[in-house]
Amino acid sequence: MAAAQTQNFARFVQWGRNVVAVGRNYKDHCAELGNAVPTKPLLFMKPPSSYLEEGAGPILLPRGCTNCHHEVELGVVIGSVCRDVEEKDVMSHIAGYALALDMTARDFQDEAKKKGNPWTMAKCFDTALPVSKFLTKQELVDPNNVTLWCKVNDEMRQNGTTSDMVFSIPYLISYISQYFTLNPGDLVLTGTPAGVGSVQPGDVISAGLGDLLTMKFPVAQRK
Amino acid sequence: MAAAQTQNFARFVQWGRNVVAVGRNYKDHCAELGNAVPTKPLLFMKPPSSYLEEGAGPILLPRGCTNCHHEVELGVVIGSVCRDVEEKDVMSHIAGYALALDMTARDFQDEAKKKGNPWTMAKCFDTALPVSKFLTKQELVDPNNVTLWCKVNDEMRQNGTTSDMVFSIPYLISYISQYFTLNPGDLVLTGTPAGVGSVQPGDVISAGLGDLLTMKFPVAQRK
Ligand SMILES: [Mg+2]
Ligand SMILES: [Mg+2]
Ligand SMILES: [Mg+2]
């Protein structure tokens, strides 16, 4: 692949071709939405067209959505092809990390769940995936034990730690790789802790990962 | 984007970053699965990792799947960025076409629909998107009126025409572009006519588009 050959992971947003996300991977978040804790990872995807880098403009609430939620998540950037990778080998396939917001049109999702429809309208809209800068593995030494938080207009909404994940990063990536080959530059979103909630046009979402980074995104309505 | 800059549409499978698919876009197919004809396009996505080019190996039935269906579809390859594109302008944003099989783990999909879960496991697995060679716009002059067929082991299973689509190509792409920006090299799958059905390891699926092309893919079990 032309794209992967560049291997400039600092710019994975520009050339990565897939994003695999896991839902309900923190018990307290399962509880707040009334969902059971899953017995196997619940997977969905977001397209690269939903990426939003800091400074590139606001999160745009999709047309018709009246309840768009922030979900702060640790993202894992894949460094080399993962196909049927064993758990013990996963860490060697990771290039680094990013903090992400899995923006979710909760009203669209509720409708999809009721009708048995895909989650696509709820999860994949333009700007539905704000992301931080890339962090190398050396910068985040223990991804399974780092705090992540999300504020809306300086009010703390989410404040968790990746040590509370139901399925660990090695387990998730091994599982995903049994069905979906992961390629360099792909992002794996590892789920969100409790505290998700609605944002409105004019709000500002900020989020942080340990003492490693913070990021900030304004919210607007897509006209 | 490094990838898009090459603009070698004959190789869109190698660098395109997204596939947007529409479900239930032929009335006779809605009827055969007991679904209502939708009043707006039903959208889902497939990842580039699911592409399978002819000659690159067999379609691999995903682990645990016991009812994997063929769905033959016309694919539209995007030529330039589509964001809030009007119907009348859509044709100028198209680079060309490909014939595709939207392989679907129907048992996984039935379970997802029942539970209100994403369709990802059913639609996105490796090899779930066999595709033909690229056709230019000059080669397929009237995409809204071309026959498409699918055989399993020389038995005709699907034999339809794109003139039976519920939503036309311009309508679909205009609609999609209101939520999801389409980029050069992206593929839009336009739905399948009636006759979908199960395939087994050892089967050979062949499919054709008008008198323009045929393609052939063997089926095997992912070990
Ligand atoms: Mg989906
Ligand atoms: Mg999430
Ligand atoms: Mg289909």
Image: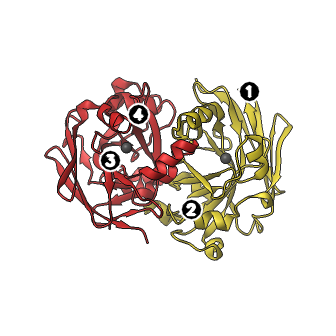
Chain colours: A yellow, B red
Subunit under mark 4: B
Horizontal and vertical percent position of residue B103:
37, 52
Is the CB atom of the residue marked by disc 3 within 8 angstroms of ligand 3's nearest atom?
yes
Same chain letter for marks 3 and 1? no
The answer to which quarter of the image holds residue B23 is top left
- Foreground residue among A142 and B114: B114
Pair 4/2: label in front: 4
Looking at this view, is B212 or A165 the one in front?
Answer: A165
The chain ID associated with circle 1 is: A
For the C terminus of chain A, which image quadrant? top right
Identify which amino acid the numbered label 4 is placed on. Asn
Depth-wise, is mark 3 or mark 4 nearer the camera?
Answer: 4
Residues under numbered marks 3 and 1 in contact, where contact means CB atoms less than 8 Å apart: no
At numbered mark 4, what does the secondary structure look like: helix, strand or loop? loop
- Give the foreground label among 2 and 1: 2
Q: Which residue is mark 1?
A: A202
Position of A168 compared to B139: left or right? right
Residue behind mark 4 = B35
Cα–Cα gap, marks 2 and 1: 37 Å
Tag 2: amino acid: Ile
Judging by the rendered image, the residue that carries numbered circle 2 is A176
Under mark 1, the amino acid is Gly
Q: CA distance from mark 4 to mark 1?
A: 40 Å
Q: Are marks 4 and 2 in contact (CB under 8 Å)?
A: no
Q: Which residue is mark 3?
A: B71
Query: B56 or A113: nearer the eye?
Result: A113
Q: Is residue B194 visible?
A: yes
- Taking the spot 61% from the left edge, 64% from the top edge, the residue there is A173
Q: CA distance from mark 3 to mark 1?
A: 44 Å
Count neighbours of disc 2 (C-alpha within 10 A) and say few if under 14, some if 14 to 19, many if 20 or more: many
Marks 2 and 1, the one that precedes in the sequence = 2
